[in-house]
């Protein structure tokens, strides 16, 4: 199964990346410096895997590569934040996520891409970038809720960042993701025939995407007008993220795995 992509190079890169991610994820006694360098190596290998998948001899894309790109983007955000906030602690969870995402993409490499227009890769990039930003928002929301719960229990927070900082970062990522999601939907509405050879169509992918857009719009409006925060905001964020996940990843999973449509 690991050679589903038909590429030995891709399989070797994927296995090496998963192993590199496993080091900081599983080695509890690893020093901070060693864990950091292991994560950097894994991040670079992950980038090579994505480059090979998306820009190789036979570019492919599907639900698993989309998740892999999303995980890589979240790890990129974490790497940048780690420089700004050295106390941030989410290395083990994110390394485990990266390892699983890479292996999943190796087993389910997606279908070959034959872009009918140079705009199609840009459209896909916008969509996946919005996935990454919303995923980063979800990670920060989870850290925020965990920190809040530990504070209520009079325990020392493990996230490493103040609660207000986590909340501020959560909404910043959500707002940036909303902008990119809006651009993605607008491009599909205006240039659908050029991108996919057909005009805008209300299929399940479109419906879930629009519902996710509405959920995120309500989240940001509720934050701006009514001061939504805490449990209410997190629930709306989780709902919108789940709808967005079902929009592309869910539909492609059904087509590629359940129905077995590989073309």
Image (cartoon, grey):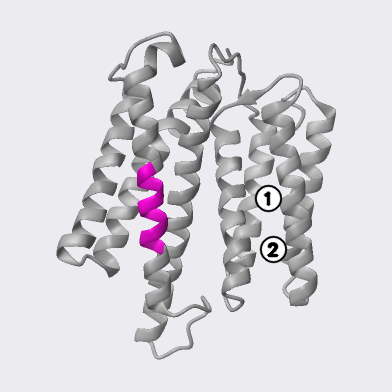
Instruction: Determine whether 213 is above or below 153 in the image.
Output: above
Report whether residue 30 is seen. no
* Residue situated furthest bottom in the rendering: 154
Q: Which x, y percent locates residue 71?
A: 58, 48
Residue drawn at x 63%, y 70% as measured from the top left: 83
Residue 25, numbered circle: 2
In the rendered image, residue 89, in percent from the top left (x then y), is placed at 58, 73
Residue 169, compared with residue 214, is above or below; it is below
- Residue 127 coordinates in the image, percent (x, y): 46, 35
State whether the magenta stretch is mostly helix, strand or loop.
helix
Q: Is residue 236 left or right of residue 145?
A: left
Q: Local crowd at mark 2 within 10 Å, few (<14), some, or many (≥20)?
A: many
Extent of the magenta region: 170-179
| 180 relative to 14 in the view: left or right | left
Q: Which residue in the rendered view is the most extreme toward the left?
A: 226
- Residue 23 is left or right of residue 189, and the answer is right
Name which quarter of the figure residue 198 lies in: top left
Q: Which residue is mark 1?
A: 99
- Residue drawn at x 38%, y 16% as measured from the top left: 192
> Hey, which quadrant is residue 11 in on the image?
top right
Residue 15 % position (x, y): 79, 43
Q: Earlier in the sequence, mark 2 or mark 1?
A: 2
Query: For this rendering, which residue is in front, 149 or 137?
Result: 137
Residue 2 within the magenta-colored segment of the rendering:
no
Crowd rating for badge 1 (residues with CA inside 10 Å; few <14, some 14–19, many 20+): many
Check whether the beta carbons of the residues at disc 2 and disc 1 lie within 8 A of each other. Answer: yes
Report the residue at 60% width, 34% height from top.
65
Q: In this rendering, is residue 262 above or below 12? A: above
For residue 124, say whether it is visible. yes
Secondary element type, mark 1:
helix
């Amino acid at each position: 199964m690991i050679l589903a992509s038909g590429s030995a190079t891709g399989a070797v890169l994927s296995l090496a990346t998963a192993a590199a991610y496993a080091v900081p994820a599983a080695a509890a006694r690893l020093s901070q410096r060693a864990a950091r360098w292991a994560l950097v190596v894994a991040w670079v290998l992950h980038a090579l895997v994505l480059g090979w998948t998306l820009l190789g001899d036979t570019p492919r894309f599907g639900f698993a590569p989309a998740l892999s790109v999303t995980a890589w983007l979240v790890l990129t955000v974490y790497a940048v934040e780690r420089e700004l906030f050295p106390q941030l602690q989410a290395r083990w969870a994110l390394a485990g996520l990266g390892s699983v995402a890479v292996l999943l993409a190796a087993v389910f490499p997606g279908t070959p891409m034959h872009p009918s227009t140079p705009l199609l890769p840009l459209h896909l990039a916008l969509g996946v970038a919005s996935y990454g930003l919303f995923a980063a928002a979800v990670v920060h929301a989870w850290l925020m809720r965990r920190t809040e719960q530990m504070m209520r229990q009079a325990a020392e927070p493990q996230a490493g960042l103040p609660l207000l900082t986590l909340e501020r970062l959560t909404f910043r990522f959500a707002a940036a993701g909303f902008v990119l999601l809006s651009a993605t939907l607008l491009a599909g509405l205006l240039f659908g025939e050029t991108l996919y050879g057909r005009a805008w169509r209300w299929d399940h992918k479109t419906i879930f995407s629009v519902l996710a857009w509405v959920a995120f719009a309500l989240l940001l409006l509720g934050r701006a007008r009514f001061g939504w925060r805490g449990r209410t905001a997190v629930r709306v964020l989780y709902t919108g993220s789940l709808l967005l996940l079902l929009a592309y990843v869910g539909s492609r999973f059904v087509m590629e795995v359940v129905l077995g449509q590989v073309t």
